[in-house]
Image (tube, grey):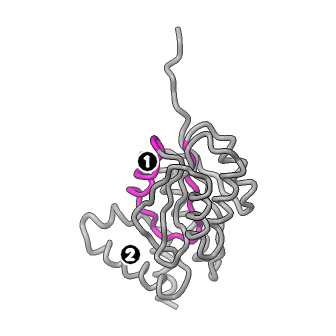
C-alpha cells in the first residue's frame, strides 16, 4: 500500500538580533518559538546567517525567517507568508524603521540567494538591502503588512500599549500571543 504524499512541515528559523535587556530577549524568543510551534512549524534558532541559509537551502518546503527582536508576531502574517510562498519566491515583512520582521523563502532558492537575503535582513535598515537584492535577482516577491520590532524605547512603549489593549479586548487576547512578554512588562512595572 502506497503512503499518501505528505508535505514536510514548514521550517521556521529564528534569527537572533540583539536586544538590550537579556530578560526581554528571552521573553521575545520564547514567545516567538511558541507561536511558530503552535502553527505546526519546525523551529530552529541561530545567529550565523550562513548556518541559517544552509538550513533554509536544505529544507524541502517553504522557510520563514523570523527575528528575535519582534514582539507578538501576528499569526495571520505567518499564515499569509506561507500562502504567498505557494506562488512566489520571496515574501518580506517590513518594519516602519526600515528593518525586516519576517522573511519567507520558497522551496528551491539557491543557498547564495538565501544567504544574501538573510544577511541583508539582519542588517540595520535591512529592508532596502533586501529590496535591492530582489530587484537584481529577478525573483518574484511580495510584501506583508508592516509590523514592528523592539529597536528603541518608543517601540517598547508601543508593544506595552498593544499588550494592555489586547487584555481589554475579548478578541485581542487571541491575537496578541506574547505571554512571556506580558510577564516581563509586569515584573518591570513592579520594580
Please identify the quarter of the rendering in which residue 129 is found: bottom right
Q: Nearer the viewer, mark 1 or mark 2?
A: 1
Which secondary structure, mark 1? helix
For residue 149, the mark is none
Q: Please tell me whether residue 133 is drawn above or below residue 81 in the rendered image.
A: below
In this picture, which residue range is highlighted in magenta? 62-87
Badge 1 is on which residue? 84
Badge 2 is on which residue? 163
Q: Please tell me whether residue 37 is drawn above or below residue 22 in the rendered image.
A: above
Please identify the quarter of the rendering in which residue 130 is found: bottom right
- Place of residue 4 in the rendered image (x, y in percent of width and height, measured from the top left): 49, 19
Q: Residue furthest left?
A: 170
Asked whether 82 falls inside the magenta stretch, the response is yes
- Place of residue 74 in the rendered image (x, y in percent of width and height, measured from the top left): 41, 62
Total labels drawn = 2
- Place of residue 62 in the rendered image (x, y in percent of width and height, measured from the top left): 55, 43
* Residue nearest the viewer, comparing 178 with 101: 101
> Mark 1 or mark 2: which comes first in sequence?
1
Q: Please tell me whether residue 91 is drawn above or below residue 185 in the rendered image.
A: above
Could one spot residue 27 in this view of the protein? no
Which secondary structure, mark 2? helix
- Residue at the image position 64 percent from the left and 59 percent from the top: 117
- Residue at the image position 42 percent from the left and 45 percent from the top: 83
Q: Judge left or right: residue 52 versus residue 91.
A: right
Amino acid at each position: 500500500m502506497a503512503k499518501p504524499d505528505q508535505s514536510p512541515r514548514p521550517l521556521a528559523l529564528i534569527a537572533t538580533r540583539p536586544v538590550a535587556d537579556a530578560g526581554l530577549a528571552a521573553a521575545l524568543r520564547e514567545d516567538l518559538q511558541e507561536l511558530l510551534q503552535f502553527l505546526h512549524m519546525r523551529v530552529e534558532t541561530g545567529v550565523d546567517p550562513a548556518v541559517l541559509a544552509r538550513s533554509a537551502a536544505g529544507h524541502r518546503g517553504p522557510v520563514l525567517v523570523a527575528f528575535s527582536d519582534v514582539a507578538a508576531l501576528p499569526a495571520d502574517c505567518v499564515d499569509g507568508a506561507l500562502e504567498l510562498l505557494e506562488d512566489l519566491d520571496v515574501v518580506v515583512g517590513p518594519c516602519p524603521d526600515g528593518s525586516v520582521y519576517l522573511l519567507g523563502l520558497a522551496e528551491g532558492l539557491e543557498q547564495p540567494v538565501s544567504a544574501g537575503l538573510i544577511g541583508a535582513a539582519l542588517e540595520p535598515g535591512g529592508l532596502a538591502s533586501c529590496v535591492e537584492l530582489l530587484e537584481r535577482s529577478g525573483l518574484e516577491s511580495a510584501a506583508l503588512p508592516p509590523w514592528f520590532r523592539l529597536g528603541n524605547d518608543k517601540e517598547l512603549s508601543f508593544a506595552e500599549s498593544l499588550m494592555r489593549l489586547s487584555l481589554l479586548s475579548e478578541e485581542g487576547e487571541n491575537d496578541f500571543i506574547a505571554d512571556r512578554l506580558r510577564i516581563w512588562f509586569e515584573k518591570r512595572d513592579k520594580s
